[in-house]
Structures are given as structure tokens and as C-alpha cells.
Image (cartoon, helix red, strand yellow):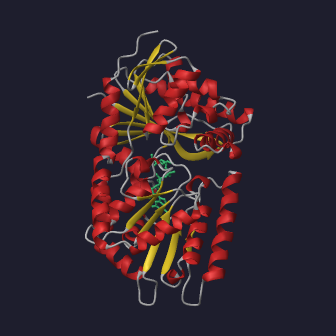
Amino acid sequence: MKRLVVVSNRVADPGCSQAFGGLAVCILDALRKRGGMWFGWNGDIVGDESDLSATSVKFDDLTLATVPLTERDYREYYLGFANAALWPVHHYRLDLARFTPEASDGYRRVNDRFAQTLAPMLKPSDLLWVHDYHLIPLGASLRARGVANRIGFFLHIPFPPPEVLVAMPEHEWLMKAFIEYDLVGFQTKTDQANFCRFMCDFMQGETISPDVLRVEGKTLSAAVFPVGIDVDAFAAMAASPGAAKRIQRLHRAGEPRINVIGVDRLDYTKGLPDRLRSFKRLLEMYPKNCKAVTLMQIAPPTREDVRAYADIRHELEALSGEINGQFGDFDWTPVRYIHRRVDRDTLAALYRGSQVGLVTPLRDGMNLVAKEYIVAQDPENPGVLILSRFAGAAEDLQEALIVNPYDADEVAHAMQKAIMMPRAERIERHAALLARVRKHDAYNWMGGFLRALSACRIPLAA
Ligand code: GDG
């Protein structure tokens, strides 16, 4: 079997995989099983003059090869271009995007340096899998260094319509970089269609079969691989005796009966202020829910060095304070807002102990929280998932209550419907959703991508 080399912005430490999301854990599982190498940033930020060479650590058949970033790289590549330009543009938020020449230079520089460090470590038969928006030009930088291996790229976030993308000053260069990959994977058909439309309408490419394009003399596959979770592992976590104890604490005497849960990194794409406004409408339109329903919102901090993230935090704090002030009582806090990271097993218990899962991003590549909520439920007495139509997950999870997160009244009505839903309907919807989540689990995602990459035509020598 060919060696698999995974490249992502951050590399997880196998010693503390609990600290990372499901995705890192799943890459780690696959790499452990199959053996291979994982290359990327180790999370360290060093002085600009420091040694930036790679450090390799072996865990059985898995090699972790990591590099630090300099303070300037962190500012320009990570915060500046990846998170203040690409992230908002890909989430259709041109109003929040900041473009500076320093940031795009930093992005090119770090991608180039990653390629320079990685290229000598590769064997001709390696299969390369590059992840996400931080590393779009990595394939092109590797090709420029003579790397002729099969290289695949997976985009975890949405691909915006071409009309949005063209507002970004660097878009032409960036789109050319995509065609150096053999396979580009997307979360949804919508993302794939937006990408193909750009390639065909703006770069004179042509579709030669449903998932294959010919652009500027190169053949490129562009296909859909919806990301998923390790279903059995998460279900076991949610059904453990430890989880049962936590759920009991959540529902201790005198506490409200109904728990609505939201779990999101504190990011403006996740629609948190709109969610709180919807919850407020629920209490206004259906006052019987006062003292009976609580919204628990877990929102751990991320990217706090980017201005838009500080703004969203202030807005959320103000809104939860306003709702608690207006509706709360000495024996009831309507909104419990937790601005820190909780353990993954606590999260699993909270999902299971909540009758409603509220997943209402304004735009999201897939959204793993939606899948985790489904998997964590007791199949005999499951909760109800309310899901934004703008989450990639909504393309598949049609038995959820699908809502428009911008419409506070619509979301409030859906919450009321979820609270009142008869058990038989909850069981029926949940069974259908669980089957879908199982079909597109983490292993299917990874296996599907790697099979497609292996089947790609061998790149022609230049
Ligand atoms: C990107 C795309 C795509 C959250 N808070 C805590 C915590 N989490 C975990 C969740 C989940 C993960 O983080 C978040 O995954 P999402 O998919 O919801 O969102 P992004 O972080 O934006 O991920 C997204 C994903 O990549 C994969 O391709 O689905 O669309 O934006 O696993 O459970 N975990 C713990 N404590 C927390 O407080 N332990």
C-alpha cells in the first residue's frame, strides 16, 4: 500500500487527542491504522530569526513531522490571510474580509516554506492529502519543486459562488493553484457546483465527465465527500455511566425540564446572536416555556486575535444578559452561556441530556455538531435536531427541522414544534437521521476520498 502523507495547518499530538476536534482524531486513527506521515504546524510561535526546520517524532508506523511558525507568519499567514480574508470570503461575508498585501505575501511565503520543507521528505510513491483553506497553494508549490505524486485537496469550509469570490484581490492566483491537484474534494454538491462554475465560466475550463474538469490543459477531478464522525465511539461516550451521572446533574430537582443545546466555536459564521434572538422570540410567542426551557450555549473562544471575533463575543454577552435580565427569575436562568472549552465526554452527555439540538449557522461547510447531537441521543427517547438550511449537513439530514437562521420567528416556531413533538415522531425522525450519519461516517469520508485519489489519472510529466 502506498504511504499516506497528510498535510494540514495544525497537527494533533497523539498523546492528547482529546484536546482536538473529531476530525483530527479521525485523521490520527486512519494514519495509525495505515501508517504514514502527518505534516504541519505544531502550534508553536517562535521569534522571526528562529530555526524553522521540521522535527520528526515516530509513534509506531506514524511519523509526525512538524514545524513552528514565526510571529510574522502567525500574524500574516494565519490571522491575516487565512482567517481574516479566506474564512469570511468562503462564508459569503465580504463585509468582514480584510485584504492586505502583507497578509497575502505571508500566505504565499508559509505555503512555499511548507513545500520546501516537505518535498525532500517525500517518496515518489506517496499519496498526498492536503487539508483546508490554509494550504490551497501547497500543491502548486510542491509541483514547482518537481513533486509528481498524486495530490488531493479537501476543502472543509464552503466554496462560495464565483460572484462572491471575484471580490477577493488574490482570487485568480488562488484558483490557478487548485488546478495543480489531481482531486479536489468538497463537503456538498453546492460547493462542488460553485467551484465547477468558476472553473468553466471564469477560467474557460470544460466538464469532461460529471466529476472531471479540463482546465488550462490539466485534468482535475472535483467531487463531493461529506465529512462525518466516528459514530460508534461517540455513541458509546454518550451512553456511558459517566454520561448518565452528568445528565442527572443537569436535570436535578427544581431545574427546568427542557434543555436546548448549542455547541459552537465562538465564530460569526455560527449565527449565535441570531440564535439568541430566536430563543427570545420563543419566550415571547410561547410564554408557557418561561421557567420550563433553558438554552445552554457552549461557545469556546477561537481566533480572538481577529477583530471580528471580539465583536461577536461582546454582542453575545450583551444579548444573553438582556434575555436573562428580561425573562429570568431567582429560580430560572433562561440562557446559560459557557465561554470555555468543555471535555468531549461532557459534551456527549450534554447532547444526550438535551431535548433539542439547535444548530443554526449562517453558513457552514458541514457542521459536525449536528451529527454528534444525533449520535448521542437515546434511540428510544431521542431529542429533536433543528438545523440551518445553510449548514452543509442540511443537504443530507432532511429529517431534521430545517430552518432559515435569519428568520427568528421561524426558528422559534421550530423550537416549539420540537418541544411538543410526540415521541413516535421523534423516534422515526431520529432513526432516519442516524442511518444517514452512519452512511457518511468518518471512515467512509476518508476511504472514499483516498479511493478516488488513487483512481485519478497519473499526472503527466511536465
Ligand atoms: C470546520 C468547518 C466542518 C466545539 N466546542 C467544543 C468542542 N467542539 C467540537 C465539536 C465538533 C467540532 O468542535 C466543531 O466542528 P464543526 O464541524 O461544528 O465546526 P468547525 O470547527 O467550524 O469545523 C465545518 C468541519 O471543519 C469538519 O470538516 O464540518 O463546517 O467549519 O467536533 O464537538 N469540543 C470540545 N469542547 C468544546 O467546548 N471538546
Q: Which percent across, then down, holds residue 234?
A: 33, 60
Report the side of 337 relative to 37 (left or right).
Answer: right
Q: Is residue 106 above or below residue 88?
A: above
Q: Which percent across, then down, holds residue 348?
A: 38, 66
Report the side of 311 relative to 442 (left or right).
Answer: right
Instruction: Please give the name of the residue rendered at 58% of the width and 40% of the height, measured from the top-left corner.
Output: 90
Q: Is residue 381 above or below residue 48?
A: below
Q: Which percent across, then down, holds residue 394?
A: 43, 50
Q: Which percent across, then down, holds residue 271?
A: 58, 58
Across the whole image, how many numbered discs are drawn on residues? 0
- Which residue occupies the foreground of this view, 279 or 115? 279
Q: Is residue 280 above or below residue 32?
A: below
In the rendered image, the quadrant that contains the N terminus is top left
Instruction: Please give the name of the residue rendered at 60% of the width and 36% of the height, measured from the top-left corner.
Output: 51
Instruction: Please give the name of the residue rendered at 62% of the width and 79% of the height, measured from the top-left corner.
Output: 324
Query: In this rendering, does residue 335 appear at all?
Result: no
